[in-house]
Image (cartoon, rainbow, N blue to C red):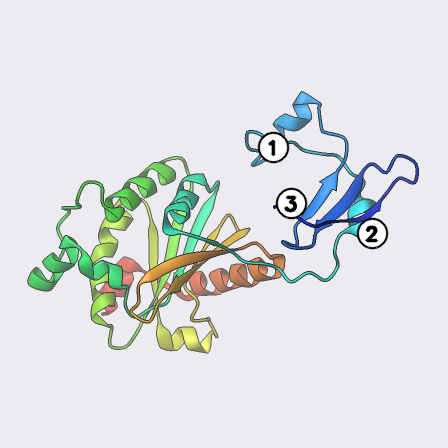
Amino acid sequence: MAGRLRFNGTGSGVTGCPSVHEDLDSGEVIVRGPPLTDSEDVAQLQHLSEGEVAVVVPRDLLVDWSPKEQTRQVRTIDLDEFHTLFERFEHTAWRLETRQRYASDEFTERWSQFIKAGRLDEDWVEGSVVTWFAETVRAQTAKGKRIERVRLVDEPATLGQRYLFESAKWNIAQGEDIRHLKRGQADLLRLPAEDFWLFDSRLIALLRFDDDDQLTHVDLITEPAEVVRCSMIRDAARHHAVPWRDFMVEM
């Protein structure tokens, strides 16, 4: 069914082009204008996908006619789409890991091995998410990209956190930087309980869990104020967190 598009305004009183319309159902903004055709200019655009076209509009058109008070809609994605973010980021992927338990860990052979032996051997199952992530970390860090995380740790550490202590050495071997921060110190720093990834300091992937600690879906957030807030969280957590090897000596 066709959407309900409202004509907001135009920067031209003669041709009506370029102009701004608004979808009253979805809140999306439609900008109409002449296409960018210069091949050298087009080559400089980032994230322009096949089938997409760039249009050129005066800055005043967006200032004058774009919606001023619009509740931002968070875009929810499934776990398959979430995984593609690790293949598409350009510079940095940073994680704040805050939970006491991740239920998905407990359904793996690695978890069973840890429970029985108290340690982990490098025996990742081919095709598993763990193996996929390790291979992705290795491939991306080989290109000079950074993948980092700070884990909050309770005192005493939970069973799930102790499992992650052991698991961390394999991630680090692939090129990931993993650091730990005691929860009491995180509370003093007023770090939030949110569990999220921050990609390229511009995209937040907020992880959503159910009551059984299962990751169910991911909310993507690009709102500038939220991105700045999460960047400040990253800077504070990374500054105070202790590298994995040093933290294990203290434990």
Lower position in the chain sequence, tag 3 or tag 1 = 3
Which residue does the numbered mark 3 point to in the structure image?
Answer: 2
Camera-nearest label, 2 or 3: 3
Q: Measuring 48% from the left and 43% from the top, which residue is drawn there?
A: 91
Which residue does the numbered mark 2 point to in the structure image?
Answer: 64
Which residue does the numbered mark 1 point to in the structure image?
Answer: 52
Lower position in the chain sequence, tag 2 or tag 3 = 3
Rounded to the nearest angstrom, the CA distance separating label 1 from label 2 is 25 Å
At label 3, the amino acid type is: Ala
Rounded to the nearest angstrom, the CA distance separating label 3 from label 1 is 20 Å
Camera-nearest label, 3 or 1: 3
Q: Secondary structure at mark 2?
A: helix
At label 1, the amino acid type is: Glu
Q: Quadrant of the C terminus?
A: bottom left
Q: Secondary structure at mark 1?
A: loop
Q: In the drawing, what numbered circle is on residue 154?
A: none
Count neighbours of disc 1 (C-alpha within 10 A) and say few if under 14, some if 14 to 19, many if 20 or more. few
Q: Is residue 57 placed above or below 21 in the rendered structure?
A: above
Asked whether 243 or 83 is in front, the reply is 83
Q: Residue furthest front?
A: 1
Q: Measuring 43% from the left and 49% from the top, which residue is drawn there?
A: 93
Q: Is residue 227 placed above or below 1 in the rendered structure?
A: below
The answer to whether the residue labelled 1 contacts the one labelled 2, judged by CB atoms less than 8 Å apart, is no
Q: Secondary structure at mark 3?
A: loop
Q: Is residue 143 placed above or below 147 in the rendered structure?
A: above
Note whether residue 249 is visible.
no
Question: Would you identify the image quadrant in which residue 212 lies?
Answer: bottom left
At label 2, the amino acid type is: Asp
Rounded to the nearest angstrom, the CA distance separating label 2 from label 3 is 26 Å
Question: Would you identify the image quadrant in which residue 208 lies?
Answer: bottom left
Residue 39: horizontal and vertical position, in percent? 66, 21
Residue 42: horizontal and vertical position, in percent? 65, 27
